[in-house]
Image: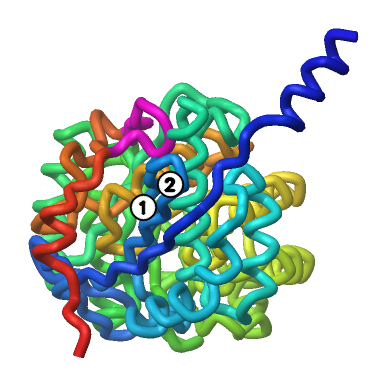
Amino acid sequence: MAKTRTAKRNSEAAPLLIRRVDAIPVSVPLTHPALMGGGQRFDESETLIVRIEAANGLVGWGEASAAPTMTGDTLPGMVAAVERHLAAVLIGENALDRAQLVQRMLRAIIGNTGAKAACDIAIHDLVGRHLGVALVDLLGGKARGSLLALYQLANPTVEQDIAEAKAKTRAGYRFLKLKVGVKRVEEEIESAHALRRALGPEVMLCADANMGMTMANARKFVTGAADAGLLFLEQPFRDNDLAGTLALARMSPIPLCADESAHSLEAIMEWQRAGAIAGVNLKTIKLGGIVPLMRAAAVSDTLGLAIDVACKTGESSIGAAALAHVGYAVPNLDWGININNHYLATDLVKRPVHQNNGSVECPTGPGLGVEVDESALRKFRVKSK
């Protein structure tokens, strides 16, 4: 009888109706340029902030960075996707039916996973604020007591990488990622060894090519850097190059991790079945939000893949908070969490998400647990042409 009464109360709960969806494009300067594989250089972060307002006045916030070379999403395209397609399937709907809303967004427009992710995160923030619970509790609660923070090194020279790495290890970081596919491969091999010599055996190291390597250079790198003790090499080739990745995996002493290739659950399963990867980097912007990321994490864990979760370089503490909650809730996190709000010259929340002693904090409070700085949004908002 008690269960019946509870079910009846839940079914009669007042809906949390969505009355407004705003797409807010911003461009925020970075503290210093970030160099990525394939010669990409970032001086500022272009990111979409989504604001979803309910009929009761509560507001939820979400974020997804533009990633033309990863998801195909540009900032103007993300704004258009929200304003012309996604808002129409959300306004007037019950935010408490968040899983159903994710499915509706998936059907509303092909691709555009960044725009969908920003809306999905905003819905989760709104629901958490309405129920008075943290996002991690909406996702099932904490599966761990701390998150291993992965700090990325993306400087022009190895000397700068070593100096930054030493400073970060003194601050408590135990896991560092070296960006490769940028310089001559011989220089990058030496960088890996130089970092290992400078940091000792206790610090974990990995490398990320962001699709920037040729097969010849990738073979040279995994062979030459084998003794540097790298935990994995991430995404050496283009996102659709399964054959090349499999060929490298068969001879590489360094395990391979998929990032840009892990754009869907089906792709993750295909690459794992082929034997091309030992782990996977999961991002909300690739998979379309929190709900599909959690599904991908559960399947990846079942398949025996190591998992790391990451923001794109330059996402603010809105995206970082969402990822921190997810990181605490996913079934395994063997390869850590990589948030990058520290790259921003100015964050978009009043109290940024922090990394302390090599771990990422889980924000407290309902929803994402962060308070958006609307004055910063106004300052960095991209004006319509």
- The residue drawn where x is 50% and y is 86% is 215
Image coords of residue 326 (percent x, y): 50, 42
User: For this rendering, which residue is in front, 112 or 18?
Assistant: 18
- Confirm whether the magenta stretch covers residue 286: no
Q: Amino acid type of disc 1?
A: Gly
Residue at (55, 80) in percent of width and height: 239
Residue under pointer 2: 323
What is the span of residues highlighted in magenta in the rendered image?
A: 359-370
Please tell me how many numbered marks the rendered image carries: 2
Secondary structure state at the residue bearing disc 2 = helix
- Mark 1 and 2 residues: CB-CB less than 8 Å, in contact? yes
Q: Is residue 276 visible?
A: no
Give the percent coordinates (x, y) of residue 131: 51, 29
Q: Looking at this rendering, what residue extends furthest in the right direction?
A: 1
Provide residue 42's location: percent of width, then percent of height.
20, 75
The question of residue 368 being in magenta is answered with yes
Residue drawn where x is 46% and y is 29% of the image = 134
- Towards the viewer: 272 or 15: 15
